[in-house]
Amino acid sequence: MAENLLRKWEVCLNNADLEGIVSLYTDNAVLWGTFSDIIRDNPELIREYFEALFLRENLKVKFGSSNLRSFGQAAIYSGEYEFSYQSDEIVKCPARFSFVFYKDESGSYKIIDHHSSLTPDSFLKQ
């Protein structure tokens, strides 16, 4: 189910599981990362994004409200989440997201598109 893929992503991120998180994306996936100014449109660039992200001490994500819509082989999950990590103090970064999941021939879902950005209020406060 599509919901399970989102939970796997959350667990992988909260455990800094690089291999686990990159395995959730298709080979032709596109990632617009929260903390990146470039589009990540191949497996190497997606891996590079998470390698850099996992350098943040005690990185965590917590999901807020979200919506799931399914359309045959695809599902779209959008909503809010909050990243946090340790710097001199705990830094919290509220963000919004859209994941597009694609169901392959085996019936398994993978991420084909992922967009994430800081919420406008959090951006203006920084």
Image: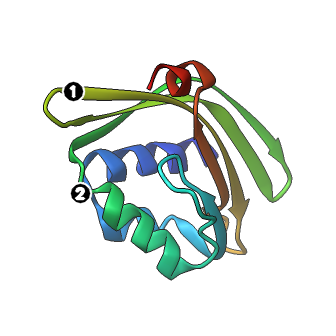
The three-letter code of the residue at mark 2 reads: Leu
Circle 1: element type = strand
Question: x and y percent of residue 2 in the render?
Answer: 62, 47
Label 1 with label 2: CB-CB less than 8 Å? no
Label for residue 23?
none
Kindly identify the residue that appears in the image at 65 percent across and 49 percent down.
115
The residue to which callout 1 is attached is 90
The residue sitting at the right extreme is 71
Residue 120 position (above or below residue 116): above
Determine which residue is flagged by label 2: 55
Q: Is residue 66 above or below residue 43?
A: above
Q: Identify which amino acid the numbered label 1 is placed on.
A: Ile
Separation of disc 1 and disc 2 at Cα?
15 Å
Q: Quadrant of residue 10?
A: top left
Q: Quadrant of the C terminus?
A: top left
* Residue at the image position 50 percent from the left and 70 percent from the top: 46
Percent across and percent down for residue 33 are 54, 53
Position in image of residue 6 (x %, y %): 52, 45
